[in-house]
Image (tube, rainbow, N blue to C red):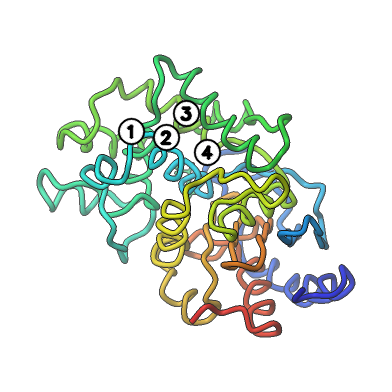
Amino acid sequence: MICNSSEELHALVLEAKTYTKIGKVADYIPALGKANQNDLAVAIHYPNGDCLSAGDIEKKFTLQSVSKVISLALVLIEKGSEYVFNRVGMEPTGDPFNSIVKLETMALAKPLNPMINAGALAVTHMIEGTSVESRFDRLLSFIHEMTTDSTINYCEEVARSEFETAHLNRALCYFLKQNLIINEDIEQLMDLYTKQCSIEMNSLNLARIGVVFAMDGIDPTSGKQIIPKEIARICKTFMVTCGMYNASGEFAIKIGIPAKSGVSGGIMGAVPGKFGIGIFGPSLNNQGNSIAGIKLLELLSKNYSLSMF
Ligand code: GLN
């Protein structure tokens, strides 16, 4: 155990909470703009089933970009790494997550990595199935298996407004279609992608997903290999190199934990061989990462020597 009690975790939440005042909640759609800037929650899920938590843990949030690492694991399982990496790269970018610039300047190039929007759209395109519903069901079932919570679903309000306002993501899709990376109807892909981003859970659920990645894809309760070890390794590597967008380098140096963030303020952490972390703090910094969430991870990493480097 790193942290012996929820009280210890509570003290860290209190310390990090002052940072919630500095950032700003995502407001590109009204549903996300309604989030309470002061919220901060953390859950730690250990392989033996123990769970410690502190803060606003009952609060639900949408996964947004945290979903990108989950969809990546799913398509790597379904299609294999050769197929996937013929269509999306492995290199970090210094650009913001929704940047279009590399798709234009690198003619006929694949998106640089699966953690930026262009790459994530290419990955979501690869989810198998004959309809948006059946493809979304595959992703949701995968999440149900990892969280052991079959009540998890997507938030219709967030999905609808994401769909209506995703003009830049549509533009990325048109570039991807022009570059022959995707070949499906773009409205259909946007429907699937915006539902994926709108999958809703709390920080305990997120920590449960984190522990599966942390334990090389093995479900800590049943012992079942949910994700092949090699795929869990690939996902954790992407979390280190690209998981915090264009702040991934600084995050690796200061914190050193594989992590994936989303603009709703969620961060999923997977401390290899140790435990999963689920964080929710909707107040964001300029790169779109939870500002207090990062502070909290920094405190955890420093206090308990969690950096893998
Ligand atoms: N739904 C958002 C988008 O695709 C998710 C982005 C994010 O969390 N960074 O733009």
In the image, what residue type sits under mark 4? Cys
Label 3 – label 1 distance at C-alpha: 9 Å
For the residues bearing labels 1 and 2, Cβ distance under 8 angstroms: yes
Label 4 – label 2 distance at C-alpha: 12 Å
For the residues bearing labels 3 and 4, Cβ distance under 8 angstroms: no
Instruction: Please give the label number shown on residue 166.
Output: 2
Instruction: Please give the label number shown on residue 197.
Output: 4
Dot 4, how many residues are within 10 Å of its Cα: few (below 14), some (14-19), or many (20+)?
Answer: many
Instruction: Please give the label number shown on residue 163.
Output: 3
Dot 2, how many residues are within 10 Å of its Cα: few (below 14), some (14-19), or many (20+)?
Answer: some
Label 1 – label 4 distance at C-alpha: 15 Å
Dot 1, how many residues are within 10 Å of its Cα: few (below 14), some (14-19), or many (20+)?
Answer: some
In primary-sequence order, the first of circles 4 and 2 is 2
Compared with residue 293, is residue 234 higher up or lower down, i.e. above or below?
Answer: above
In primary-sequence order, the first of circles 1 and 4 is 1
Taking the view exactly as shown, the residue that stands out farthest to the top is 130
Cβ at disc 4 under 8 Å from ligand 1:
yes
Label 3 – label 4 distance at C-alpha: 10 Å
Residue bearing the label numbered 1: 170
Q: Residue at x 64, y 37 (%)?
A: 145
